[in-house]
Image: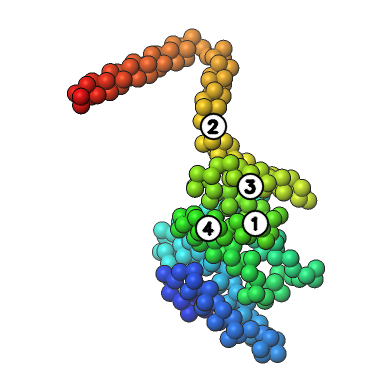
């Protein structure tokens, strides 16, 4: 049986129906109801695995590609990694912010997944984000950040939502917070993707500053050019100047015709 069959849902199932199906199946086979019978523990484990995979948009795309595509033409999409490794991503979402007891294992954590509000909310928020419903996703991630302020993933996704909504200052604040949290981990998290997203955000916030930096870089590289490269660069600058002048003339002509 595949994950969809285990949960009794269709491939087109949305998150709300997926969560409802998971709760239904979890109640039907939870080991606590059957004296921790080994066969029920195994069944429950499959139910949880199905939900964890299908509730994550990226894992679901990977699973669907492997399950439904013809083997000769299957292209499994690359999974996005925010932390330093995929394992770090998984542990960050499952553990950080959920405040489990010290003796909790991943298995017992999964056993209690239906009671884990933070994890469920994070998966719901991720689905809204994937559908580009950034306002709804932003409200949920803001709630998650308040519940789990040291969770890097929630900070990053909240920053992404704020960027999409044009709230660049708030986005930068949470990107920097994520980097600060990562630097205090043991071992420290390098978070190269987060650094890159913050750099891109700065270019959006301060385009004039980025243009100044580009001019500065051009001046630095100027002395390294060969005579042939300098001649090509001068020709490109002149061509650009002529195109801009021609565009201005055309705009002025159009304005006169409109009058």
Q: CA distance from mark 3 to mark 4?
A: 15 Å
Task: Tell me if label 1 and label 3 are in contact, CB under 8 Å.
Answer: yes
Near-viewer residue (65 or 185): 185
| Alpha carbon separation for disc pair 4 and 2 | 26 Å
- Circle 1 — which element? helix
Q: Which residue is mark 2?
A: 206
Per the image, the residue denoted by label 4 is: 137
Q: Are marks 1 and 4 in contact (CB under 8 Å)?
A: no
| Percent of width and height locating residue 127 | 50, 62
Disc 1 to disc 3, how far (Cα)?
Answer: 10 Å
The label shown at residue 174 is: 3
Q: Secondary structure at mark 4?
A: helix
194 versus 39 height, above or below: above
Residue ID at (59%, 68%)? 120
Could you give the CA–CA distance between mark 2 and mark 3, rounded to whole angstroms? Answer: 18 Å
Q: Is residue 88 visible?
A: no
Rendered image quadrant of residue 116: bottom right
Residue 96 position in % (x across, y down): 70, 60
Q: Is residue 233 above or below residue 187?
A: above
- Write down the residue under mark 1: 145
């Amino acid at each position: 049986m595949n994950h969809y069959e285990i949960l009794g849902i269709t491939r087109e199932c949305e998150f709300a129906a997926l969560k409802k199906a998971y709760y239904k199946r979890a109640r039907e086979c939870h080991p606590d109801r059957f004296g921790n019978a080994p066969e029920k523990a195994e069944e429950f484990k499959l139910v949880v695995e199905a939900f964890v995979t299908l509730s994550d948009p990226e894992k679901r795309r990977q699973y669907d590609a492997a399950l439904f595509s013809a083997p000769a033409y299957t292209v499994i999409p690359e999974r996005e990694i925010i932390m330093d490794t995929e394992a770090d991503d998984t542990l960050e979402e499952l553990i950080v912010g959920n405040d489990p007891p010290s003796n909790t294992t991943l298995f017992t954590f999964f056993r209690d997944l239906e009671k884990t509000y933070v994890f469920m909310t994070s998966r719901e928020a991720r689905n809204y984000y994937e559908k580009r419903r950034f306002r709804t996703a932003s409200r949920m991630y803001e709630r998650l950040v308040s519940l789990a302020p040291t969770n890097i993933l929630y900070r990053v996704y909240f920053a992404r939502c704020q960027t999409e909504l044009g709230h660049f200052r708030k986005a930068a604040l949470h990107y920097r917070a994520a980097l600060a949290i990562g630097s205090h981990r043991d071992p420290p998290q390098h978070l190269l993707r987060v650094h890159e997203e913050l750099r891109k955000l700065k270019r959006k916030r301060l385009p004039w500053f980025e243009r100044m930096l580009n001019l500065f870089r051009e001046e630095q590289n100027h002395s390294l050019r060969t005579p042939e490269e300098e001649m090509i660069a001068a020709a490109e600058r002149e061509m650009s100047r002529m195109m801009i002048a021609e565009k201005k003339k055309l705009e002025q002509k159009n304005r006169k015709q409109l009058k």
